[in-house]
Amino acid sequence: MDNFRRQTPAKSPQRPVDGFFAKPSSGARRPATSSDTNSTGMRFSGRRSVEGFNRTEGFHSSNRRTLIKPSPAGGALPQAAPSRHAPKIEVPAPSKRRRNKKQLSRFQIIRKWTSRSLALGMLMALIGGGYLFSQGYLQLNKVFQGGSSAAALADDVDPSLLKGEGDGRVNILMLGVGGSEHSGGDLTDTLMVASIDPVNNQAVLLSIPRDLWTKMPNNYIAAYHKINAAYESGKYKHSGKQVQNNDDRKAVMAGFQGVDGVVERVTGIPIHYNVLVDFDAFGQAVDSLGGITVNSKERLYDPTMAWENKRNPVLAIAGDNNFNGKQALNYVRSRSTSSDFARGERQRTVILAMKEKATEAGTLTNPVKISNLMSAFGDNVQSDISLSDMTRLASILKRIPSSQIQSVSLADPGNNFVTTGNINGLSVVIPKAGIEDYADIQTYIRSKLRDGFITKENATIAILNGTSTPGLASDKADELKAYGYNIGLVDNAPTQDYAKTTVVDLSNGSKKYTLNYLKKRLQIPNAVTQLPAGVIAENTNIVIILGTNEANPSQN
């Protein structure tokens, strides 16, 4: 309370009277004011006086005050102040009601400032959250700045926009690299296709062996090399030199274009998007998710990776493992004591675990985690996916349960299409059918990556041979089955004099996507809706009658 007391000049000390302080003398009498009135109606004059006269200089034995009491007429009559021995004038205490008002006033003040503090706190939280989201949004735009688009991402896809079978899926080539701080940092040690079926809410993870010996997109490194060099071959060819950083966006896109061409030639499916992630981004992504739980089929022991695992050669135990980013990275990198095929399987397992954790309630709605994740991505991830397409993909992935995600490789038991070998002193993987012979591989992949629209419509198709070429209908049936078509009747037409292939739509337009694919594959501008004379096709949606142009493609 000291800051609220009036300071009295040192030459004129004042004595308190009933808790009040008299005002200092100013040398001239002033009229009493309402501010000099206490709660009893009494007022104190601003000067020391005896019967209205000023004190003379010198020592005085008594120190008296003059009390001024209002007269009935409103004037002021001077009266002598009581001596020091007279009883003190008691000032009545404030009433209980008055005290309650004071207490209520204090309570209101506290409540007011508490409300203001809470409001300020909420405001700061919103500002902080908005900052984190804005930072995340900026990083999102930095990562997802592509312009291409997969037709299948639209809600109501125009069939004419689908170029061919496979466009009913969204195929994303995921590439894992060491990064600029690692030797050979642009070699893609991980090549995995995430093929998403947005129509039927399914997905497939397909691993491609990093050591697959194949033709390069250009001759910058060599005419043939391991497929893990395809990205850097395209990137370095554009740059004219080896540059492991990703500052040159055009060089990165050239790298994507190079590796896409090779992967499409091997798999027979279109690649719509690319995502390139380095070791740092992968580890930080796992940590931003709060770690992941990975079920390992067997114990993973790798002494060559012990230095990365606190000198512990056991990277995983059989069963559930709770991994942080570093541990998950060690798990997907190890291959010295297993194989590249086993490593590919582990990588797919980890991707599924990350997907599970990312879709858990609250993970992707936490602004701090989003900010951390996007910060990691902004520096260590490259892609050609637009932000709008990425948003659409995220909403689709939420709908796909893990039970509807298949894990596929080219060396699965019963479907092993590759083998190991040695070329020029390099340990490589080659197709069992021979170098650059991918026919069996493509047939297998297409059977696993059935077009979403073909799957949904599941149109029954009859194939009739309208030529004298034997086996033409069977060959065409096998070809279409490889793309996921539902083939029913395979037979000869009543006559073999069809010059051009004919497609008959008996579905009343309900199988528009399947019909669109078939017309483009068979190069038929229009389908008819009436069966030719003598042709019978029961329980069939579409009938294909092969003509001589199909037997002799040069006629097309």
Image (cartoon, rainbow, N blue to C red):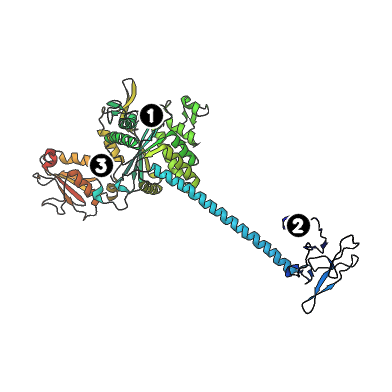
Q: Secondary structure at mark 2?
A: loop
Q: On the image, numbered disc 3 is attached to which residue?
A: 483
Using the image, tell me which numbered label, if any, was put on residue 7. 2
Q: Secondary structure at mark 3?
A: loop
Residue furthest to the front: 57
Which kind of residue does numbered mark 3 sit on? Answer: Tyr
Which kind of residue does numbered mark 1 sit on? Answer: Asp
The foreground one among 235 and 369 is 235
Q: On the image, numbered disc 1 is attached to which residue?
A: 340
Q: Nearer the viewer, mark 2 or mark 3?
A: 2
Residue furthest to the left: 497
Q: Quadrant of the image for the C terminus? A: top left
- For residue 98, which quarter of the picture? bottom right
Name the residue rendered at 68%, 62% in the picture: 106
| In the image: residue 70, left or right of residue 478 | right
Q: Secondary structure at mark 1?
A: helix
Q: Earlier in the sequence, mark 3 or mark 1?
A: 1
Name the residue rendered at 68%, 64% in the picture: 104
Q: Quadrant of the image for the N terminus? A: bottom right
Query: Where residue 79 sits in the image (x, y, percent)?
Result: 85, 72
| Crowd rating for badge 3 (residues with CA inside 10 Å; few <14, some 14–19, many 20+) | many
Residue furthest to the top: 425
Name the residue rendered at 54%, 51% in the picture: 124
Q: Nearer the viewer, mark 2 or mark 1?
A: 2
